[in-house]
Amino acid sequence: MTVSQIALSQGSNTSAAPSQSAQPLTEVGRRTRQAARQLAVMSAEAKNQAIEAIAQALAAATTEILAANQADCEAALADHISKPLYGRLKLDAVKLEGAIAGVRDVARLSDPVGAVHIHRELDEGLVMKRVSCPLGVLGVIFESRPDAVMQISALAVKSGNGVILKGGKEAVRSCQALVKAIQQGLAQVGVNPAAVQLLTTREETRALLQLDEYVDLIIPRGSNAFVRFVQENTRISVLGHADGVCHLYVDKAAKIEQAVAIALDAKVGYPSACNAIETLLVHQDIAADFLPVVAAQLHSHQVELRGDEAARQVLNSLKAATEEDWAAEYSDLILSIRIVDALETAIDHINTYGSRHTDAIVTEDEAAAATFIAQVDAAGVYHNCSTRFADGFRYGFGAEVGISTQKMPPRGPVGLEGLVTYKYQIVGNGHVVATYSGANAKPFTHRDLD
């Protein structure tokens, strides 16, 4: 969904009374919050049983889900959908099986709810705890990626949250089939299926942003412009992941064979992923030896290469890179190359053009690596490995609701820990604040327990 489409739907309703769809959406929010309150007090064992029931229901509905996705893919091709979006949309049997395995992985994770972070005696008989608890209701808006429905639903159940999902129109059949199976799985173990809801119309996206009475966190997964639109048009807290402009810097002390393998993995493995590299930075001292080798490998995978003037002197077949290329998220088989004269220049380039997502250095110089890791401003900074490891499943989170590039936590791939907050609980025995103020104020003990 584009910003202009959302704005168009907004404009179509500005002079009219609330549409019929707006009223049911309020009811959807109310029912989701009610179901979330039930989830919030469920035991870890009960939530794990619900997640296993979801996995079983998804597996049983494989034929229906794949047929729905095939219909979505055919419609998307007829609508001339972009190649990156199509890659995210397509859900084959192997991808579905892997996603179901990811659902089960979430059940094996520790329950994030009820963890005691602070246990402190304020005074004798007056004890405070800071205890983790669910956020409440999540609103997740995403383009394509029907597999996100499964990941997010499992994480929501495990963390005791309800969730309202809104996929793009290109994935509506897939999302409907997936949510139908998820709700059936929940119902089979006595969990209110209203805990996982699906919205399908463009107008509902705008309306969801206004549900601050019922929704506690909005998670937009789409273009930079779309994320900005969401942030500017809701009073609900937003967990923002916009562009994925990731970099690989090949230092002068890099092993060429290793650098080639990492560059190849980071670009061609899944070019439409937000953790794929878009720019390759190469130290001038290694460029003449490294670039011809890596270019040959990248060309064999149909990667279009663009370069600055120095890179084009080494590889005269390169298309000239423009200023816009350095900040571009291609999400495709396109890669920009720049030769730099120093580590500091590479770091400056990344901090200027990057999106604070994930950036990596290849080098055998530990001091250079340490400097890079310390000074690059990103949620993920890697040494001698691919940026494609920026993923909740690969981090051992089971799955993720998205990747946050903001400075405040949660940051990077967001799993269960990003879906809980905490509350302070104090138990006393008739204690009053007046005891601890005035001329004869009693002192607090402030003694940590456990």
Image (cartoon, rainbow, N blue to C red):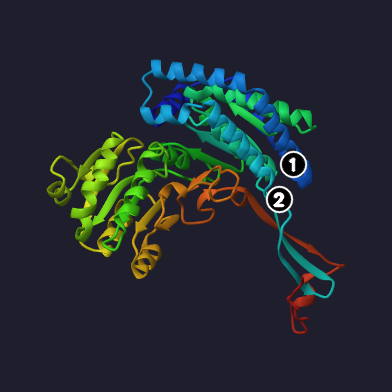
| Disc 2 residue type (three-letter) | Asp
Quarter of the image with the N terminus in it: top left
* Residue that appears at 65% across and 28% down: 58
> Circle 2 is placed at which residue position?
111
Q: Amino acid at mark 1?
A: Lys
SS for tag 1?
A: helix
Q: Residue furthest front?
A: 257
The answer to whether 125 appears left or right of 153 in the picture is: right
Task: Choose top left, top right, bottom left or bottom right for residue 269.
Answer: top left
Q: Is residue 313 left or right of residue 155?
A: left
Q: Position of residue 75 (x, y in %)?
A: 45, 16
Q: Which residue is mark 1?
A: 47
Instruction: Tell me the quarter of the image containing the C terminus.
Output: bottom right
Q: Residue at x 38, y 28 (%)?
A: 4
Asked whether 429 or 305 is in front, the reply is 305
Q: Position of residue 287 (x, y in %)?
A: 21, 55
Q: Is residue 428 above or below residue 177?
A: below
- Residue at point 55%, 41% (across, down): 218
Q: Looking at the image, which residue is at 54% across and 53% down?
A: 410
Residue sitting farthest toward the bottom: 439
From this viewpoint, is residue 391 visible? Answer: yes
